[in-house]
Image (cartoon, rainbow, N blue to C red):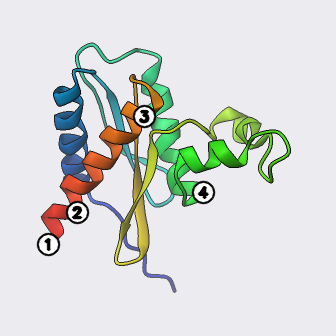
């Protein structure tokens, strides 16, 4: 039998709040998705002004980060021509994203979920996702 650590809805709300706060600071309305360790959606928020197309992108970034247990940015590097994961972004009906903004959430060495953010540049998306994680981890201290 397995014992699985998983983010709760309250945890997801902290992640979203932290990402939203950072998005407000940089002036970019974001779409923010939080998934459990298996990539299933727990919570989602589209800030006023968040791009409509970014709703699915944020969810797929979170799905990729949780399922692959790595950042979407690292997948981007590994999926370039000649690299080991070249073409991976076409797998699973195109759900695997290779653009920065999806980051796994790790607690006590275990991936318990992931956050995905979209609407800004890849660097802005990643920054907001990381801010969400830092806000959540601060609640555990």
Task: Give the crowd class for mark 2: few <14, some 14-19, many >=20 residues within 10 Å.
Answer: some
Q: Nearer the viewer, mark 4 or mark 1?
A: 1
The first of marks 4 and 2 along the sequence is 4
Q: What is the CA distance from the residue labelled 4 to the residue labelled 2? A: 21 Å
Q: What is the CA distance from the residue labelled 3 to the residue labelled 1? A: 27 Å
Q: Secondary structure at mark 1?
A: loop
Residue of label 1: 141
Residue of label 3: 123
Residue lying at 43% horizontally and 81% vertically, measured from the top left: 3
Q: Is residue 7 visible?
A: yes
Indicate the quadrant where residue 80 lies: top right
Furthest residue toward bottom: 1
Indicate the quadrant where residue 33 lies: top left
Mark 4 near mark 2, Cβ–Cβ under 8 Å? no
Q: Secondary structure at mark 4?
A: helix
Task: Give the crowd class for mark 4: few <14, some 14-19, many >=20 residues within 10 Å.
Answer: some
Residue of label 4: 68
Q: Secondary structure at mark 3?
A: helix
Residue of label 2: 137
Mark 2 near mark 1, Cβ–Cβ under 8 Å? yes
Q: Nearer the viewer, mark 2 or mark 3?
A: 3
Location of residue 31 in the rendering, given as x and y in whole percent from the top left corner: 34, 28
Q: What is the CA distance from the residue labelled 4 to the residue labelled 1? A: 27 Å
Q: Is residue 43 visible?
A: no
Q: Quadrant of the C terminus?
A: bottom left
The first of marks 2 and 3 along the sequence is 3
The first of marks 4 and 1 along the sequence is 4
Q: Secondary structure at mark 2?
A: helix
Residue lying at 68% horizontally and 33% vertically, measured from the top left: 94
């Amino acid at each position: 039998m397995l014992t699985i650590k998983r983010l709760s809805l309250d945890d997801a709300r902290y992640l979203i709040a932290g990402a939203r706060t950072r998005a407000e600071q940089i002036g970019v309305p974001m779409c923010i998705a939080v998934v459990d360790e298996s990539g299933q959606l727990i919570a989602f928020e589209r800030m006023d002004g968040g791009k409509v197309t970014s709703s699915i992108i944020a969810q797929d970034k979170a799905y990729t980060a949780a399922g692959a247990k790595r950042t979407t940015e690292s997948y981007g590097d590994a999926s370039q021509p000649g690299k080991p994961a070249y073409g991976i972004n076409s797998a699973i009906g195109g759900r695997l994203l290779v653009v920065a903004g999806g980051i796994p959430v790790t607690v006590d060495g275990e991936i318990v979920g992931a956050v995905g953010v979209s609407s800004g540049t890849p660097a802005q998306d990643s920054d907001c996702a990381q801010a969400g994680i830092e806000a959540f981890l601060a609640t555990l201290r």
